[in-house]
Image (spheres, rainbow, N blue to C red):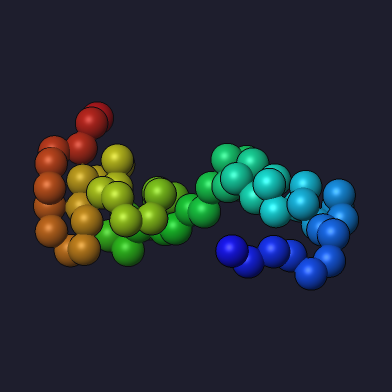
């Protein structure tokens, strides 16, 4: 079984464990190519209902 050669410092250990919290705070937004509104990536636009050039649903008015 493999063992670490050196002790991992508290700051290195804690920075590795804290990676998930930055993903919660800063979501990446992209703009819709159809209407220009901001939306989450890889999801249909809530304003116009388009995703990758196809209309998926009727938008809410």
Q: x%, y% of residue 28? A: 52, 54
Residue 45 placement, left or right of 49: right
Q: Which residue is drawn at the image coordinates 59% and 64% (left, top)? A: 1
The quadrant of the rendering that contains the C terminus is top left
Q: Quadrant of residue 9?
A: bottom right
Residue 22 seen in the current view: no
Q: Is residue 34 above or below residue 22?
A: below
Q: Is residue 22 above or below residue 1?
A: above
Which sits in the foreground, 22 or 9?
9
Q: Residue furthest bottom?
A: 5
Residue 44 seen in the current view: yes
Q: x%, y% of residue 54? A: 13, 59
Residue 32 placement, left or right of 49: right
Residue 61 placement, left or right of 30: left
Q: x%, y% of residue 52? A: 21, 63
Q: Which residue is drawn at the image coordinates 65% and 50% (left, top)? A: 19
């Amino acid at each position: 079984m493999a063992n670490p050669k050196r002790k991992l410092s508290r700051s290195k250990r804690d920075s590795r464990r804290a990676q998930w919290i930055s993903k919660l705070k800063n979501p990446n937004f992209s703009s819709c190519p159809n209407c220009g509104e901001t939306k989450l990536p890889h999801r249909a636009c809530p304003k116009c209902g388009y995703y990758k050039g196809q209309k998926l649903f009727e938008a809410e008015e």
